[in-house]
Image: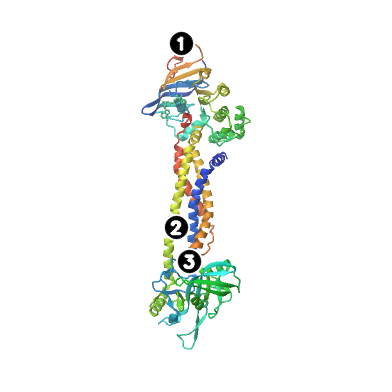
Amino acid sequence: MMMGKPKIILKSVTKYYDAYTCALSNIDLTISEGEWVSIIGPSGSGKTTLLNMMSGLDTPTSGTININGTDLTGLGQKMLAKFRRENVGLIFQQHHLIPYLDALENVMTAQYFHGKVDREIAREALERMGLGQRLKHRPAQLSGGEQQRVCIARALINDPEIILADEPTGNLDMKNGEIVMGIIKQLVDEGRTLVIVTHNMDIAKQGRRTIQLVDGKISTDSSRQTHNPLETSVGRKANSPPTSTGSARR
Amino acid sequence: MMFLRIVARSFNRRRPRIAVAVIAVLMGASMTSGLLTVSTGIEDKLAKEFRRFGSNILVIPRSDTIELGFPGISFGSVSEQRYIDESDLWKIKKIDEWSANVLGFAPMLYQVVQVEHEGNVQRAVLTGTYFDRAFPDLTKAGEIWSTGIKKIASYWNVEGNWIEDDDNGSVLAGVSVAEKLKLKLGDSIYVSYENPETKSTTTEQLSVAGTVSTGGSEDSQLFVPLSVAQRISGRLGKVHSVQVSALCVECPAELIGAEIEKKLPYTQAKTVKQLVRAEEMIMDQLGQMMLLITVVALVASGTTVTTTMMTTVMERRREIGLMKSIGAENSTIASIFLAEAVIVGVTGGFLGYGLGNVLAQHIAESVFSAPITPLLTILPVTVGISLSVAVLASTLPVRRAIRIDPAIVLRGE
Ligand SMILES: Nc1ncnc2c1ncn2[C@@H]1O[C@H](COP(=O)(O)OP(=O)(O)OP(=O)(O)O)[C@@H](O)[C@H]1O
Ligand SMILES: [Mg+2]
């Protein structure tokens, strides 16, 4: 198995929202460069919380997080914002766009926060998403699928190495879902690391590795290089990444 | 560029809310600029009035409320009419030690009348006085001494003709009255006076002999010989006050005043210095009240801006969270809201300056019956104050915006 260097390293990450809500409990997880990792699990199991940890949108109660060589522990808000701009592209379930800006401006806003606005690059990014004819449309004038593609264009505009997607097709119909997944697949083919939260098993299956969360703990973590769970488990033992727990099960 | 675009677009979307904030600032700003204009204008006027005032002692009946009515500025109304007898006036020139220093005096009898000219009707103060009246000189036997406004008020600027003191049918019109009624030299006007006690009305026809301009309250008065004013108002032999011009290089005007009071025990003689001090006190109090009103108005504007901005921040929390999640720093978020505050403050300031001038004009006309010139120097002050109020009022909402958790975006709240 040819795995790149580790991109995302979580060590004993625990998140309490309050004294009674333990959203993540002692998570150890390593994700390597170029990996496609699907995160599945029942509602409330901590999937979004996990993604928030990886993107620096939220901080763990305890444990350490290292993303793309940056240790997020103890970073201030300013540094976290900088980290997000430079390292991760976020794709949300609801197509979060700024309502009063058109498609092009929404993409350019991300460029602006990154420091350099280039209209041409923004336009090309939207054209790649098949939105060449929709540049001047405001979110309300776009379909759900189109809005999601604007989001993706925005997430990619600063060329992040890591894509974090939280149910990107959750609000889309089959056809639009397929278009969006096609684009996402292409991103991984280009060598980006993808962590995608999904309820859709068909989508999860497209990745090589699926992590199932239950009650804030990793209940299964399967590498899909091979269809033999036992072999996977053995292989992992040999390489002994400290992050994997449990055995692959289907 | 992108920053401006974000600000402009979001602005455009929330015009009604922004309008509320701008109006709030405008209110405070108009108060500020209006009251600043009025107080500087009035102070200027007073200062000028006193500086070029010809006489330096004012004689008035004792404990009369007209006390505050030094020619030109009348505060309060006359509750208890008291008069000085015209027949006593000669005594002013025959005081004990300082008689020679009394250069001249002019009695004043005021009444509000209705003036009509070619269908136009105006209210104005009709003042009776001496213009240039000859007396036997009581200090030097056999000589004639003439006194009156012409002698003591060198600042009077008369176009046309002065009036003789025995002229029954002429009037000298203040320039603003003349302007309002479109009076030309030689025009006839009708002056009506309603006696408040008998309710009977006296009307006289007078012809305009000339116009007078002083830059002071005289501009909105009509001047006639004392005898004419006494006849119209039925106050024969009476005057309200006497302006006295005393030569005072060395001598203190207070001493001359004291001698006059001794000769005319039912009067008090105030020096201009004393009157200025009284005026200054009134102006101080007026100024403090204006300041208070302005501060209250500004606090009210600030509060409105804060609540409006706060609502805006709450409405836009998703958007703020989103911006943060895609990498906006707190300072960027803060600048977006502060830029809004700056625009609101500056717009409100400019509009407020305009409205403030209208306000000042209104106050000046109705309270001081004199127009006031807008002062351009007040514009930057007003804009500066509104800007500070708007920015200050936004600090709380901005802090709120900064505290918004970017994680709300993924949570889909
Ligand atoms: N801000 C918060 N404050 C308190 N509790 C929270 C907060 N966010 C999430 N939780 C709780 O933490 C747990 C994990 O939530 P999370 O959003 O990560 O679940 P999820 O796996 O993404 O669920 P879903 O599939 O419904 O999106 C849940 O019990 C949830 O109620
Ligand atoms: Mg979720």
Point 54% across, 67% down: residue? B122
The image shows residue B375, relative to residue B127, as above or below, that is: above
Q: Which quadrant of the picture is home to ligand 1?
A: top left
The residue furthest right is A133
Q: Which residue is mark 1?
A: A230
Q: Residues within 10 Å of mark 2 (few under 14, many from 20)?
A: some
The residue furthest left is A19
Residue A155: tell me if it is visible. Answer: yes
The image shows residue B125, relative to residue B93, as above or below, that is: above
Q: Looking at the picture, do discs 1 and 3 lie on one chain?
A: no
Mark 1, chain letter? A
Foreground mark, 1 or 3, reads: 3
Q: Which residue is mark 2?
A: B290
Foreground mark, 3 or 2, reads: 2
Point 46% across, 88% down: residue? B141
Residue B46's disc is 3
Q: Position of residue B344 (x, y in %)?
A: 52, 46
Q: Position of residue B89 (x, y in %)?
A: 44, 80
Q: Position of residue A163 (x, y in %)?
A: 52, 26
Quick one: quadrant of the N terminus of chain B? top right
Q: Amino acid at mark 3?
A: Leu
Label 2 secondary element: helix
Q: Residues within 10 Å of mark 3 (few under 14, many from 20)?
A: some
Q: Residues within 10 Å of mark 1 (few under 14, many from 20)?
A: few
Residues tagged 2 and 1 counted as in contact (Cβ below 8 A): no
Mark 2, chain letter? B
Measured Cα–Cα span from mark 1 to mark 3: 102 Å
Measured Cα–Cα span from mark 2 to mark 1: 87 Å
Residue B262, quarter of the rendered image: bottom left
Label 1 secondary element: helix
Q: Looking at the picture, do discs 2 and 1 lie on one chain?
A: no
Q: Amino acid at mark 1?
A: Leu
